[in-house]
Amino acid sequence: MTGGPSSRRIHLLRHAMPLTDPTVEPSRWELSGPGRQAARRIAGEIPVHARLLSSSETKAIQTARLAAAREPVIDGRFDEVRRPGEPFDDRARERRRAWVLGELDARHTGWESVTEAGARFDSAVREHDADDLVIATHGMVITAWLITTRRLRSGAEAADFWARLPFPALISIDPNGS
């Protein structure tokens, strides 16, 4: 790092709105037309000197490309929380909110925990050595990382944060907390 750890900024870029399709794996969903427009609108907020990273999911990659006008480095550790077998139905948001709240039950069997998702994400953040990072990623894993790194309290505070997070969103973090 050239500026030293105290000058580092982490910019979390939640992907723009995808075109949802229950016949396609969510990791392969592409951005909707309005999602593409929204990603382009935040272009002026993306630091041009920052290292651009993205999860391996299509919607995050497309958001990064449109917002930064360049290719991101792909790192699967920035992927969304692993939820094998989760159906995409009218209860998906409720099920995911329960996970963020920490109210786990049979609906979450096999899902990655908040701690696991947050630790996976954190290991990638620590490994990418640059003064500034822009990470195109996903709402649940952003929330898990913020909980794991004690920037957000688990429970209702985390659930409210997640529920209010727009598509797209850019959140800037000072890793030193100052």
Image (spheres, rainbow, N blue to C red):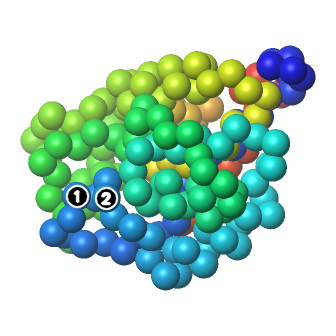
Residue 105 vertical position relative to residue 130 in the rendered view, above or below: below
Q: Going 52% across and 65% down the picture, which residue do you hit?
A: 16
Name the residue carrying label 2. 28
Do the numbered discs 2 and 1 sit on residues whose CB atoms are within 8 Å? yes
Quadrant in which residue 51 is drawn: top right
Q: Which residue is mark 1?
A: 25
Q: Residues within 10 Å of mark 1 (few under 14, many from 20)?
A: few
Estimate the x, y position of residue 6 in percent, counting from the top left. Answer: 85, 21
Would residue 89 be found to the left or right of residue 29 on screen?
left
Q: In the image as oriented, which residue stretches furthest toward the bottom?
A: 33
> Does 162 appear above or below 114?
below
Q: Is residue 155 visible?
A: no
- Type of residue at label 2? Arg
Residue 175 x/y as whole percent = 72, 26
The front one of 108 and 127 is: 127
Please state which amino acid type lies under the numbered disc 1. Glu
Frontmost residue, 77 versus 102: 77
Find residue 154 and report its horizontal and vertical position in percent: 46, 35
Gap in Å between the C-alphas at discs 2 and 1? 6 Å
* SS of the residue under disc 2: helix
